[in-house]
Image (cartoon, rainbow, N blue to C red):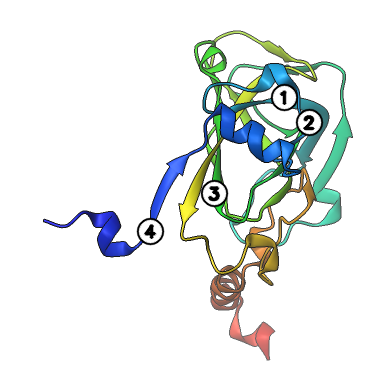
Amino acid sequence: MRDHRELWGMSAAFLIDGQYEARRKMGESIVTPFDESSLQPASIDLRLSDQETVYDLTEYVLGQDLGESQVTQRQFSRRKVKPGETVFITLKETIAIPSDCLGFVFPRSSITRLGIIIPPVYMNPGYRGRMPLTITNASPVEITILPDIRVAQLICATLNPAPSHGYAARPSAKYADEKGAASMIASDADIRAAVAKVLAASVPSSLRE
């Protein structure tokens, strides 16, 4: 039986420490600012900034627009997180995924062992920005988040062949060069159409005339 990679004509391999270093020396900064101590055998550690995205919502219909009054950005020096609470903290580093790679952000094992949940994040080739991490305190005690704490790690995989174009080149690249942007799901055309259809059906016909 032929290998599935041969059938698809594509292969992927994860970058290791020497490859991250070689790309950086050639001027390809995947993580900025870069600290030598953050380089691991096959990943780069990532730290938290002092910026938090706050949603002022009591309920939300998935896909509806978020008004300016419903999302704010604020700075903190210490952020206490109660058991069961979820916060959205922007990374300190800017991530720039090379055009021939895809990227993943995973929580550090030391963080998950404390009962802190950080869902993995996927990044297309060509993505660049400072993304927010979703952090949930699943432990029974209150925790305090401080800036500069290493909580996650970036893993990149090279693609062969490389995609025809990167993420930023797409008209729908809503998170290009982000700095902790809130969810922009409402800007997706299919999402807008689905929400409009449901809302139209829920409004009495007398009000639509």
- The residue identified by callout 1 is 47
- The residue identified by callout 4 is 10
**Left or right for 152, reference 181:** left
Establish if 141 lies above or below 17: above
Can you tell which of label 4 and label 1 is closer to the viewer?
A: 4
Can you tell which of label 4 and label 3 is closer to the viewer?
A: 4
Earlier-in-chain disc, 2 versus 4? 4
Can you tell which of label 2 and label 4 is closer to the viewer?
A: 4
As drawn, the label of residue 22 is none
As drawn, the label of residue 92 is 2
Q: Residue at x 87, y 18 (%)?
A: 77
Earlier-in-chain disc, 2 versus 3? 2
Structural crowding at the residue carrying mark 3, measured as other residues with C-alpha within 10 Å and reported as few (<14), some (14–19) or many (≥20): many
Q: CA distance from mark 3 to mark 1?
A: 20 Å
Dot 1 and dot 2 residues touching (CB under 8 Å): yes
Q: CA distance from mark 1 to mark 2?
A: 6 Å
- The residue identified by callout 3 is 102
Can you tell which of label 2 and label 3 is closer to the viewer?
A: 3
Residue 118 quadrant: top right
Q: Residue at x 50, y 12 (%)?
A: 113
Residue 174 quadrant: bottom right
Establish if 55 lies above or below 150: below
**Left or right for 23, reference 157:** right
Amino acid type shown at disc 4: Met
In front of the other: 118 or 62 = 118
- Percent of width and height locating residue 6: 27, 59
Amino acid type shown at disc 3: Leu
Q: CA distance from mark 2 to mark 3?
A: 20 Å
Earlier-in-chain disc, 3 versus 1? 1
